[in-house]
Image: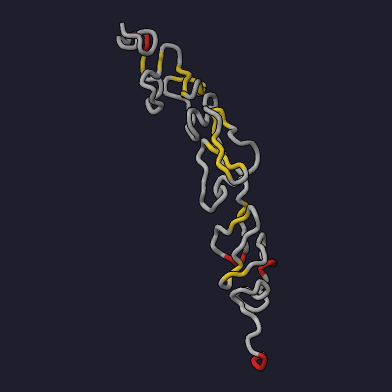
Amino acid sequence: NAANGCERNTKTDPNHCGDCNQLCSSRPNTAAVCTNGACTTCNNGFLSCDGNVQNGCETNANGNDFNCGSCGNTTTNSQYCSGVNKINCPTNTANCAKTTTGSNCEINLLTNRTNCGSCGNNCGTPANGNKPECRNGTCANCDANYGNCDGSLANGCESYLPYNRFNCGSCGNNC
């Protein structure tokens, strides 16, 4: 109504934030606070990581491995998010799944054949090898008479041990 003037300040009124009848409290996970025409205060534990104030505070920062306490604060494979804090996994374990639900540090890097030594290091069947296996964080299980003496999975079990001067009978045994 032009006759009674501008009765609402859409830059600060939480009931008319940015425009008439735009309630800050109607946006998900927000407090009823309007600053410069935008609902700016997220409820405790929530963030607006997409930059769209219209959809509220869509990101739960509690236990979120991709937004741990703040937007974009991602944990590493050797960490998980507890509340809003990064927690280091115990030695030789990892949070490879990067899920926000379920177990944390769920992978034993010493024995898991699809995450052997590090997340994503899959022990395929090596050349001159049989069933893939992870032993002490190293992919192993060469056929009898063969060894992975150079430690590289790319060339498999490359050393024929019975007739190898530098790996005679076992890796590193110099005849």
- Locate residue 124, reporting x and y percent: 48, 28
Q: Is residue 43 above or below residue 118?
A: below
- Locate residue 168, reporting x and y percent: 35, 8
Residue at 41%, 11% (x, y): give it.
145
Q: Residue furthest bottom?
A: 3
| Relative to 13, 152 lies left or right | left
| Relative to 44, 112 lies left or right | left
| Relative to 74, 160 lies left or right | left
Q: Nearer the viewer, residue 72 or 32?
A: 32
Q: Is residue 109 above or below residue 161?
A: below
Q: Is residue 42 above or below residue 126?
A: below
Q: Quadrant of the C terminus?
A: top left
- Locate residue 46, reporting x and y percent: 62, 55
Within the image, what quadrant is residue 37 found in? Answer: bottom right
Q: Quadrant of the N terminus?
A: bottom right
- Locate residue 152, reporting x and y percent: 38, 25
Residue at 45%, 15% (x, y): give it.
143
Q: Residue furthest top?
A: 175
The image shows a total of numbered marks equal to 0
Within the image, what quadrant is residue 98 found in? Answer: top right
Q: Nearer the viewer, residue 40 or 124?
A: 40
What colour scheme has been applied to the protein in the rendered image? secondary structure
| Relative to 121, 13 lies left or right | right
Q: Is residue 90 above or below residue 171?
A: below
Q: Nearer the viewer, residue 6 or 58?
A: 6
Residue at 50%, 40% (x, y): give it.
76
